[in-house]
Every structure is written in structure tokens, then in C-alpha cells.
Image (cartoon, grey):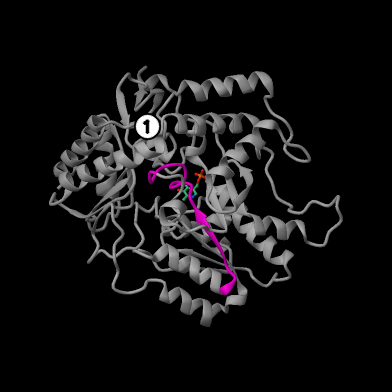
Amino acid sequence: MAHTDLNMDNQWLPFTPNRTFRQDPRVFVGAEGMHFTTHDGKKVIDGISSLWCVGAGHNRRPINEAIKNQLDTLDYATAFQASNDKAFKAAQMIADMAPGDLNKVLFCNSGSEAADTALKVALAYHRARGEGHRTVFIGREKGYHGVNFGGMSVGGLPANRKAFGAQLLPRVDHMRFIHDPVNHAYIHHEEPVWAEDPLLELENRILVLHDPSNIAAVIVEPIAGSAGWYIPPQGYVKRLREICDKHGILLIFDEVITGFGRLGVNFASDYYGVVPDMLNFAKAVTNGVIPLGGVICRDFIYDAMMNANSPQHAIEFFHGYTYSGHPVACAAAIATLDLMKEENLFARAGQQGRVLGDAMHSAFKGLPNVISIRTLGLAGAVELASIPGTPGKRAYDIFMDCFHKGVWVRPAGENIVICPPYIVEDAHIDQIVQTVADSIRRHA
Ligand code: PLP
């Protein structure tokens, strides 16, 4: 199919430069395993699991079959005042995988909805306990929690906030970012040891500026994914838990990227040995095939909401989506999680993560403009010095160049991010990394 055969007049593309897209379009019409097929018949390797989703690789028959069977059995059923067998089963599987007493799953359809759902749970929970004054949220600079108003407000990527400033949630603060470009530019499957405690400032702000009694929740990605795979210093995640415990603040981990195997274990919470009060997930839970997201809450949150003084017929939490717990999405999740287990794919992600990390550090270190390489789990970022006056251009040009060479990576600010499906083989890693390295040289 030539691209002149495609009518591109009507789709407004998300997070894409629409004005230039048509001159050099990226149009996928098929996918199998590690690869896409483009409209003009080229094979492109998926170096980013299609936005961190496709852990098990593309077009997996067991997931497809589960979806088809579900369509023929229960296509959809109203989500309010009812549920369905697949939603119960998916929730049970997810709760069983989650650490600690993270047992109650509120389903939604995306990471953005999960963020806003978790923030609303936090407010409602505090109110149910008579602490309705706890309304301040604390996020982190360069955090990403999707694009809805709550998630955008606690998020900290300036470009995502800039045009909407006047409408951001008012009672939000941000912790400082977790990157030390001088001492920890190169991180290879380790936790950088910082000389200072980056959370001292947070504690100070909680105590002095806001007063702990006003703070509802802290929300973070354990590893900053969308900003470009920035890894927290040693002890950071545990310290966050301690600070929140000390002040009665709920801790929300946004594991939309880190959840379901990316770090070689179920969740980043397992990796760091810290149980948050809420854990947000989406993406890999269905292998990206059908939208599904959710918030897993600890028992005490659910219990507090149930025990609030309201009549038995009254709804305890006025929140939900038409498609919460959609049977087809939940069938996809069940099949995905079964498949991941059967093929031991989380452990495989951990193993291949080492291969990816080794390859990225040896191929990129010392190349022109490379200022940082950070790898952990099956993901890594190489950061490049920006071209003065045109931030992000170098990474964008490299991304486009790699696409033309058959490799799909992700530009994130000045970073090129690589996070392939868990089924990735050594030869694929080699191809992706060498293609990026060649392109970095070409864009010196
Ligand atoms: N939270 C995190 C940590 C994410 O990485 C993303 C998406 O990349 C989101 C939330 C938003 O998810 P969605 O695009 O499904 O709304």
C-alpha cells in the first residue's frame, strides 16, 4: 500500500507532530512476535514493547483466543450494580500477584484513569475517616501519571502541563527529581548511592510548608519511565514509605510501566521490597491488546470506606467507568497473566535485561554527545546532549533514522529509550542497540 492510498485527513494523532507526520508516515498494518509490518511492507522491530505494553510479544494466540471466546460468551455487561465472572477472576489473579495486603482492585481502562482514580480514593478515604482536610497531593518533578487533570497535576513533565496551567489542581506540590548527572550519569543494573538524602527536602516541606495533617498522598513512579528511565538512589523507595507512614500519608506507586514483569519480578514494589498503599497498573496486564487499567488498594483503605457511616444500600465510593471490569479486557488479562506465568516471562525479562544493559553500556559509552546511560530491568535509556536552541531534536532525529533502518525506539526528551518485549532474543537486542549506536554516530 502506498501512503498516498491512505486517507490521513481525519485522525488527529496523540503525542505526535501532526504537521510533519504525513511527509514521512509511520503506519503499521500487522504485527507478529517482535515485529511490525508497515503499510509499505517493511518489517520494523518493536524496541519499546509498543509503549511498554506488549511483554509477551505481538499477536499471541492464547490471548487472541481468550478474547474471541469471551466475545462469543459475554460480550459486555453493565458495570454498575453488577459484575462478571472474568472481572472477579482477573481481580483475584492481580491481587494474588501484588505484594502485602494489596487486595482490592478498582478497574479502569488506562494509566491516566488509574492515576485519577487513586487520587480520588485518597481523598475519599481520608474523608471517610474524618480527615477531610487532607487534600494536598505530592508528586515528583518529571513524573508522568497520564494526561487527565489529576494525573497531569501531580505529574511533572513541563511540556505536558504548560498549556493547561490555569486548570491544574491547586493543592499539589512536587518533590525534586531523582537524577544526579554528575556522579551517577552511568547506571548499569545498580542503585546509585547518593551522598545526600534527596528526600530531606520533602520531609521539610511536609513538616513546615504544608503540615502533615493536610497531605493526602504522595504519588510516584518507582522508576521514572516516561521521562526517560531515571532510577532512584539506594534507599529512596524505602525512605518514602517511612516518611509517609510517619505522617499518615498514603503512598501511591504508579506501576503502569514497572508493573507485570519489567524488572524481572511482578512489580517494582517487589523489587524494592516496599508495599505502597495503592498500586496503579495498566499496559502489560493485557499485553496491550485491549485497554485495561486499575488501582490495587490495601485492605485498610477498602475497610475504612466500607465502615463509613452510611446506609447499607448507599454506594460507598462515587466513582467508576462504564467499562470498569469489561469482560473482554478481563479475559485478555487472565490469558496474558497465564501466558506470562506459563512461559516464565518475568524471569526472562530479568535475564534479558542484563543482556540489554551490557549491550547498551558497551555500545553507547563514549559515542558523540552521549551524556548518560541508565539501565535496570528490561529497559534502558541513553541520554544525549541537546542541540542548543532545539531541545529534543537530536533524540527525535535518531528515532526517525532508526525507524528507517527498521528499529522502533522511543524519544523521551533528550533520551532514546529501549524497552523490548520480554521474549526478546540476544540477536534482537544486538540489532536494536547497534542501529541506535550507528544513528548516534550519524547525528554527531
Ligand atoms: N502512568 C505512567 C507511569 C505511565 O507511564 C503512563 C503511560 O505511559 C500513564 C500513567 C498513562 O497511561 P495511559 O496512556 O494508559 O493513560
Task: Provide the secondary structure element on which disc 1 rests.
Answer: loop
Q: Residue furthest bottom?
A: 208
Left or right of 262? Residue 434 is left
Measured from the top left, where is residue 284 in percent x and y?
A: 47, 38
> Are there few (<14), some (14-19), or many (20+) residues within 10 Å of tag 1?
few
**Could you say which is closer to the camera, residue 347 or residue 158?**
347
Going 19% across and 48% down the picture, which residue do you hit?
361
To which residue does mark 1 refer? Answer: 22
- Does the magenta run of residues contain 67? no
Q: Quadrant of residue 345?
A: top left
| Membership of 252 in magenta stretch | yes
- Looking at the picture, how far across and down is residue 84, in whole percent? 71, 33
Please tell me which residue is depicted at 16% across the width and 39% down the height of the picture.
438
Quadrant of the rendered image containing residue 184: bottom left
Q: Is residue 48 visible?
A: no
Q: Which residues are magenta?
A: 247-264
Q: Is residue 81 left or right of residue 39?
A: right
Q: Residue at the location (23% across, 60% down)?
A: 185
Q: Is residue 429 visible?
A: yes
Q: Main secondary structure of the magenta part?
A: loop
Nearer to the camera, 268 or 122: 268
In the picture, which quadrant includes the N terminus? Answer: top left
Please say if 36 is above or below 430: above
- Residue 45 is situated, as x and y percent measured from the top left of the image, at 31, 29
Task: Return the x and y of residue 213 as percentages of the image width and height.
Answer: 62, 76
Label 1 amino acid?
Answer: Arg
Residue 164 vertical position relative to residue 204 in the rendered view, above or below = above
